[in-house]
Image (tube, helix red, strand yellow):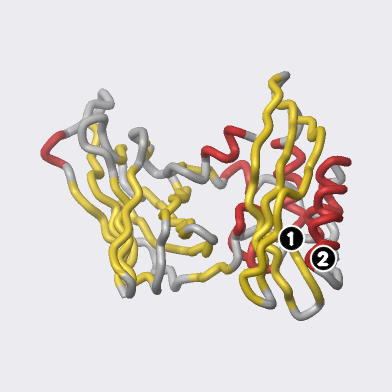
Amino acid sequence: MKKIKRLLTILCLVSIISILLIGCGKKVEMVRVSTSEEVLELFNKYNTENNIEEMVKLYSDEYIDYIGYDANKIINMIKNNRKDATINSSTTKSIEEINENLKKAVVNINAVINGEETNEDYVYALIKEEDGWSISPDGISECINFDVPANKEKELNLNLMKEAVLFDGALIRVDLYNDTSNSYIFGTKDDKTQIIVETTEGTFTSEVEEPQEISKRVKSYFIAKIQDLKGDIKKVTVTSIYELDKEGNVIVDSKRDIVAYNK
């Protein structure tokens, strides 16, 4: 759980190759219930029972949209991630009403992962949809999609794809396609990459904790947590990107910034 939680606080590169290789099955029929309390009670029950299929059926449309894969693939992804994990308990700590269609829930999850016991609090969004109440992990209350332009040939392409609205900011997902024969690195120990997001409400920044290497001819994406982000996104800039030489050393004078979105 600690590892999963940490991924939401730093920039992370996520390979999509393994996900695309997950097979498809029959369509999953999503489930909606009459109250927010009921959806949370069912989620806790299925989570503790490791009944992943029924748990995912409760996921909100906004969360499914943000993940970008159908429920079958999400089920398989969770099963793979939980091979070395046992959920001992999933308990509601609090529910806060934001408005008539949205509530914020805090759930305490006690688990054993690779033989180590963890006890963590997690935030969930409870969303009232047309057919009833659903649940969003990570507190995702809304998914905003952006028009993604075609990738440019023989260039390092970064394009803002999605924004997941959170109670304390947002997650942004940026598509990455390196259509060059060069390798790159996001930041160095002395010059960390920043994700600068300009909105109608101001400028918000997230810093990459560790340098991230980008191999040549790779297609992937990264997710960044932007704390306290408010307003509509106008521009996203990724700073301090360096080219690597054949030995993997940083070429200092190759530093550049890339605009991933500009409205």
Amino acid carrying label 2: it is Met
Furthest residue to the top? 115
Mark 2 = which residue?
Answer: 30
Q: Secondary structure at mark 1?
A: loop
Q: Residues within 10 Å of mark 1 (few under 14, many from 20)?
A: many
Which residue lies at the image location 44% right of the left edge and 56% below the top edge?
175
Q: Earlier in the sequence, mark 2 or mark 1?
A: 2
Residue on which disc 1 sits: 59
Q: Residues within 10 Å of mark 2 (few under 14, many from 20)?
A: some
Image quadrant in which the C terminus is located: bottom left
Q: Is residue 206 above or below residue 211?
A: below
Camera sees residue 154: no
Q: Quadrant of residue 82?
A: top right
Viewed as shown, does residue 214 lie left or right of 145? Answer: left
Helix, strand or loop at label 2? It is: loop
Q: Nearer the viewer, residue 195 or 175?
A: 195
User: Do tag 2 and tag 1 residues touch (Cβ < 8 Å)?
Assistant: yes
Q: Amino acid at mark 1?
A: Tyr
* In this view, 220 is above or below 232: above
Q: CA distance from mark 2 to mark 1?
A: 8 Å
Identify the residue at horizontal 75%, vertical 58% (top origin). 71
Whole-percent x and y of residue 199? 33, 70
Q: Position of residue 8 (x, y in %)?
A: 51, 45
The spot of residue 68 in percent (x, y) is 61, 60
* Residue at left offset 46%, top offset 59%: 169
Query: In the rendering, at what x and y percent does residue 12 appear?
Result: 46, 42
The image quadrant where one finds the N terminus is top right
